[in-house]
Image (cartoon, rainbow, N blue to C red):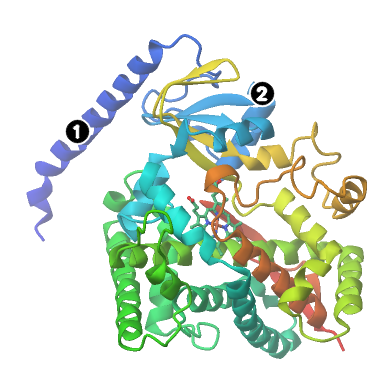
Amino acid sequence: MNWLSLLVPLPIAIIGFAAYLSVQVWKHKNLLSKITNLPPQPPEGNWLLGHLGMLPKDNKLFILNEQLFKKYGKVFRIRILFNTWVVVTDPELIKKITMSRSYDMSSMTSNAFKDLFGEYVMLSLTGDDWKRHRKLIAPLFTQARLRKFSTFMIEHLDKMVAQWKQESSKGSVEVTELLKRTALDIVVEAILGYKLNSLGDPSNPTTRAARVMLEMFPKTLVPFYKYTHPFEYRNLKKSRDMIKNLVEKIIEDYKNNPEKDAELLTLMMGASDSETGETLSRREVIDESLTFLFGGFETSAGTLSWVLYHISKYPNVQKKLQDEVDSVLGGRSPSFEDVDKLTYLNCVLKETNRITPVAPQSARESVEDVQLEGFDIPKGSTILLNFHSVNLNPEIWENPLEFSPERWTNFFAKNPEDRDKSKDVFPFGHGFRICAGMKFAELELKIAMIKMFQNFTFALDESKKFTSINMLIHTPEELYLKITPRV
Ligand code: HEM
């Protein structure tokens, strides 16, 4: 390429782009200036970027929001370019918003999901289209289906345990990678009935494509990502196409052999609304399969990594957990019915979700002008539901920074009927759009925890740096543990 040929068009494009941004920012500010009773905001940042410069370098927006919450209270706003985000940090307000038809999925997230996964994914749909999908798909996670899922969850986890046993003699093991591969194998089998085997063969092309698609997707939420990273973006789309082709092939195969069970895919194809007779089209089923793969991959692996991170630091909690697993199961493999018998394990999971939720926040958009805590919120505002600030609020939690499953043991002892309601930490969101795979996820997390603590004792390898990453979801990135098999 002759770079000199860019000398004229490139500066014109840059100036054009800057002018476009300036006009958008001006229009946005002008619109807001007509509203007198807006939520408070930190002193206006850069005229163009707004408060973008305040974001921590590691992109942990929820940390910035926590700091601002201390200063500005339950509802405040920040501006990023020409988007104003209204941040909500109060549990009752969060519940009110997620249960109100005045709010729907935010177009910021919705557009990104649409762009990569397709027009018809639950995470991007709004209004009646979303209702139809949710009504047809959510009930597919029946008890009978979950029981079936539990059998292959156990199979995959047994393979992971065997691999950790082999690696345990090495001194220390980086655990997040094997957790991710196991979670991927589980969710691919549950959604598509397909044995991916990313645990045994991480470099096979399908595994690689699935991981590129699922792990890189959150980056596309960064404004203008596809223009600033055209090659990465092309690679992402290529990987997406490869996975879509695989789903197409599985559907064809199922059509030719209808006695085959392609798990959730089969159920989605047969789903029909008993009142209206509506069904999902082939394209809708394909798009939804991809969303469900996304929904159930890094979230589950990340939660399990956080469990291991906390437990490795608290040997007394680990011992109590192992004692419970031993006394309930007596060394045998767990069954579907066992998972809810482990009450302390449930408290450990809740405490992990409180202190380090993998989804520290979610978003909605106001579909009409609304009032929130007496403030005027114009139609089309992005509302950030900041769960993490709720979970660390000292007015709600005693010693909020302390990892203590006992706070839940005590809470449930005093409030036996109130399993989740008054002290919600929102790991799966809340309201109409609460996680559609929640039951699946809870089952997987609990079975995995049983398997891990039945077989091993974990300790942090203090000589290695621990890192976490936040791109839409917040998960450990590198976690080295000394793993001792239990005899
Ligand atoms: C530990 C595991 C998981 C966590 C922490 C998690 C968390 C979440 C959260 C926070 C939301 C947004 C809810 C809201 O804004 O109110 C969500 C939505 C969703 N999740 Fe999950 N999730 C997990 C596992 C799964 C699994 C296993 C699946 C599928 C098999 C799944 C499928 C979905 C779908 C389809 C939605 C969109 C629901 C809608 O918009 O109606 N998730 N999840």
Residue farthest along the front direction in this orientation: 275
Mark drawn on residue 71: 2
Amino acid under label 2? Answer: Lys
At 60% from the left and 19% from the top, the residue drawn is: 373
Residue 421 place in picture, x, y as percent: 74, 43
At 7% from the left and 50% from the top, the residue drawn is: 5
According to the image, label 1 marks what residue? 15
Image region (quadrant) for ligand 1: bottom right
Check the picture and name the quadrant holding the C terminus: bottom right
From what the image shows, is residue 30 above or below residue 52? Answer: above
From what the image shows, is residue 75 above or below residue 227? Answer: above
Instruction: Please tell me how crowded label 2 is: few (under 14), some (14-19), or many (20+) other residues with Cα within 10 Å.
Output: few
Q: Secondary structure at mark 2?
A: helix
- Nearest the eye: 433 or 179: 433
Residue 7 place in picture, x, y as percent: 11, 44
Q: Which dot, 2 or 1, sits closer to the camera? A: 2
**Residue 192 is drawn in which quadrant?**
bottom left
Q: Judge whether residue 105 can be spotted in this image.
A: yes
Mark drawn on residue 314: none
Q: Secondary structure at mark 1?
A: helix
Q: Judge whether residue 482 can be spotted in this image.
A: no
Residue 392 place in picture, x, y as percent: 74, 40
At 57% from the left and 24% from the top, the residue drawn is: 76
